[in-house]
Structures are given as structure tokens and as C-alpha cells.
Image: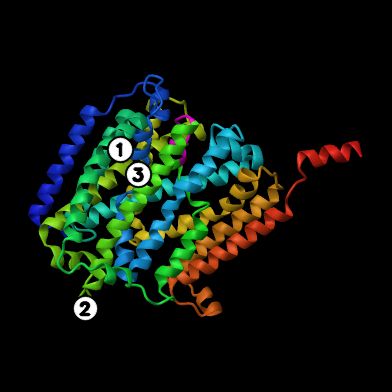
Amino acid sequence: MLASSMQMYVMVIALLAIAVFTLITAPAVKTAEGFFSGSDQGKIPSVWTLTLSQVTTWIFARSLLNAAILGYLFGIAGTLAYAVYYGSFLTGWLIIDRLRFHHGETSIQTFFVRHFGRLGSYAYNLLVSLRLLSEVFANLLVVGIVFGAVGSGAWQLSILLVAGLTLVYSMRGGLSASLKTDVQQMLILLVILAGLMVLLLTHQAFEWPSILSSSPELNNPGWILLIVALLQVISYPLHDPVMMDRGLLADRQTTRKSFIHAFWISTLFILLFGLLGVFAGLHRMGEEELMGTLQRLFGTPVMLLVGMALIISAASTMDSTLSSASRLAVVEMKIGQATPATGRWAMLLFMLGGLFLVYVGTDDLFAAVAVSGTASLFLTPVIIFNIWLKRDVARWSFAVNFIVAVLGSVLYFLETSGYMSLLGDLTGFTHSYSKLLVITLFILAVGVLSFALGLKPKQSEVSDEQYA
């Protein structure tokens, strides 16, 4: 999306206004509890504060653009496939509920240490660190795409501006500020998305039958991706520290309601935004790309709303990402003293890491989702056997599972980047999503088998043997 001069001025002014409003309303936190845990003078967040915070942190710029692009390329199947990932709110609630109220855990890391020792903690911290970095990188990349061509002056200035503004107010209030700004930004985003949907649904060329029949072939890559999403949706939430952090803030009833509300609200938003892509895909001409088709179909007003939605969602996601990054580094990994000052240094380093990836990384937005989602598959047996079934397994099972998942994610990256074609040669598959499905199935099969073989006897069984 190459914004016109007028669009850029409007978006920059709006961004500055939101930043100033955020700085005024976001609390300047001085205590470690407020900075890392989000508590407001001992008060827990309400259901709707948590809900809107969850929705805002998952309706981020990369997600909105991915949903639209997948709809544009693969029809309704692509949009449905991406929406399936939002089932993570339901599986995430089941995970966090078991951890807190059945296992008695107050931290994800302590659970991994208790079951798998240092290897478990190191593996999990590595995964979530990469996830957080990828979030900063991807959302900054979307901001650049909104303002100009990759590498252009507008592209670079917009990225630095959004990064700087987000960092300033995030460092000011930590998680406490993030929770409050998430609600404010969500309400603004809601108005923008509602406006977009009105313009889409009232367009003279919009027809529901055409939308719903836009993916008639069963071998459509969108349907294949939907199967992948269904397989990954169990492990996906556990590798998202932003979601997990918010699952640790309130009582059981509040947490359950917030996750369920976040599920249906965010899924609805993704489906509606994805419809923009499906509609545009049905009316594209020649070699047009998504933004060019939307510009032709709707004109400047809609493109301005799209740009605003992407920028606001990018900023709202990054402040939550930075607050989770500071908590991960300082509270969970215990790097430095648990003070707001140390947390602010962690935020700065993660932002610099994200900026570094912007300039040296890939420009494929879905690649970061697929690679991290594939690596997170080592968590699926952990969730099923250890968290849900409360069984213990040998640590070698975890090690095998982790190594295979990491190798699988590396293989997917190499295959999709064109560095090798091992899977293509072995299976005959050419599309990246078909290859991703093969890798996902293999990782899950090895993981479940290794955990089944490494199962330890239940405590009651051990007791019975002792008295036999």
C-alpha cells in the first residue's frame, strides 16, 4: 500500500494524537507489581478490560493484513483458515485454567522447570523470545508497507516514528499502561472496522453467494492451511506470552469469561476483515495486488481507513508485546533486578531487535506465523500429557520432541525460502502449505509417540507396587 501525501499526513496526525492521548491517560508506574503484573492498587482487571486487551493484542496489523491477503489469494477458504487460529482463545483458556487451578502454577516457566528441568525452561523461553521478536518485526513491517515502498524514506520514517512513540508510552507504564491503552485503542479500532464493513457490505458489487463459493476446489491451498491451523491450534496459545500473561491476572471466573468473549469477538473481526480480501480477489484485474484492487474498488476513503486500522493495531500490539517481553526477561528469566528500570531496558532491547529484523529479515508476513507455529508444535504433547492429563514423562521424550519441532520449522523455512526442495522431491508437493501440512503431521506423530513411550507410572501405581 503506497499512501498518497494526503493519506500520510492524516495518518501521521492521527497517530500523534493517539500517542499524546495515550501518554496523558496511561499511568506512570513506579512499582514492580504495576509494571510487570498490571495491578492497579491491588485491583484485578475487569472482564471487559481483559477481553478488549486480549482482542487488541490478537487483532494486530499482521493478522488483519494476513487475513485479507489469504482471502484475496485463496477465497473464503483462506480467511476461514486464518480465523481458525483464533480458536487459540478456547484452547488457551483450557491450558491456563488447568495450569492455575489444577496444577497450582503461577508461572508457565515454573511448570516447565518442575517437569523438564532447565532444558524445559530454556526451550520455552527461547521459543517465546523469538515469538515476541517476530511480533515487533512483523507489525513494524506492516507500518512501513502502509506508508511506502520497502526501503523508501517514507517507509523508514514511519517505522521509526511508530517504534519510538510506542516505546515511550510502553516504558512509561509497563503492563498496567498496556491494559488501559489496549481498551482505548480497541474502541477506536472498533469504529474503524465497523466503518469498513458498512462500506464493504453496501458496495453494489458485493454478493454473498459469490463470497461463499469463492473456494470451490478441495485442493485449494486455503483448505490445506485450514487443516494445518486445526492441528496447530492446541499448541499455538501456549507459545504466545501476551495471551498467557493475561491469563494470570484475574480470578478464575473473570479469566474464563474474558477468554470466551475474546474468542468470538476477535474471530468475527478477522472474518469481516478477511471478507475485504475475498471481495477484492473476486474483482482483481490482471496482476493486481490486494491494495491496488481495494484502491480501485473503493477509492481513497477506504484505503485511509485500512491504513488507520493497520497502524493502530500495530501500535496496540507492540505495547503489549513489549510489556510481555519485559516480564519474560526480568521476572521469568530473572535477568537483573525486578524493577521498572530493568523492565524498560528489556523493552528497549526487544524493540531494537525487532528493528534489526525489519532491515535484515524476510518480507513474508505469514512466514513468521508459520515458522513459530511449527516450532511451537513441541508443546502439543506437553499440553495433552502433562497439563491436561497430569501425567509425567521422561525428559528424553521432551528433548526428542523439541529437537524434531525445531528441525521441522527450519526445514519449512528453507523450503519456502528456496534454499532446498527436499520435501518437494520426496512428496511431489509444490505449494508451501502442503509442505507445512506434511511437516506438522510428522512433528506431531513423533512428539505423541515419544511422550507415549516416555510415560512414567502414575503415583498411585508406584504406591501399589511398593506395597505388593
Q: Which mark is residue 57?
A: none
Please tell me in which quadrant of the rendered image residue 148 appears: bottom left
**In this figure, which residue is indicated by the disc labeled 1?**
182
Instruction: Find the magenta span and give its range.
Output: 244-251
Tell which of 308 and 401 is nearer to you: 308
| Outermost residue toward the top in this view | 41
Identify the main secondary structure in magenta. loop
Q: Residues within 10 Å of mark 1 (few under 14, many from 20)?
A: many
Based on the displayed image, in which of its 4 quarters is residue 74 positioned? bottom left
- Which label sits on residue 286? 2
* Amino acid under disc 1: Asp
Q: Are marks 1 and 2 in contact (CB under 8 Å)?
A: no
In the image, what residue occupies the spot 23% across and 76% down? Answer: 287
Viewed as shown, does residue 313 lie left or right of 367? left
Q: Nearer the viewer, residue 425 or 238?
A: 238
Numbered disc 1: secondary structure: helix
Dot 3 corresponds to which residue?
A: 55
Could you tell me which residue is drawn at 57 percent across and 65 percent down? 441
As shown in the figure, which amino acid type bears the numbered disc 2? Gly
Q: Secondary structure at mark 2?
A: loop
Q: How many marks?
A: 3
Q: Nearer the viewer, mark 2 or mark 3?
A: 3
- Judge whether 109 appears above or below 221 on screen: above
Whichever of callouts 1 and 3 sits on the residue coming sooner in the sequence is 3
Q: Amino acid at mark 3?
A: Val
Residue at position x 38%, y 35% in the image = 50
- Residue 378: image x %, image y %? 57, 53
Please identify the quarter of the rendering in which residue 187 is found.
top left
* Residue 74 lies in the magenta stretch: no
- Farthest residue to the front: give it: 209
Lateral position of residue 376 relative to residue 62, left or right: right
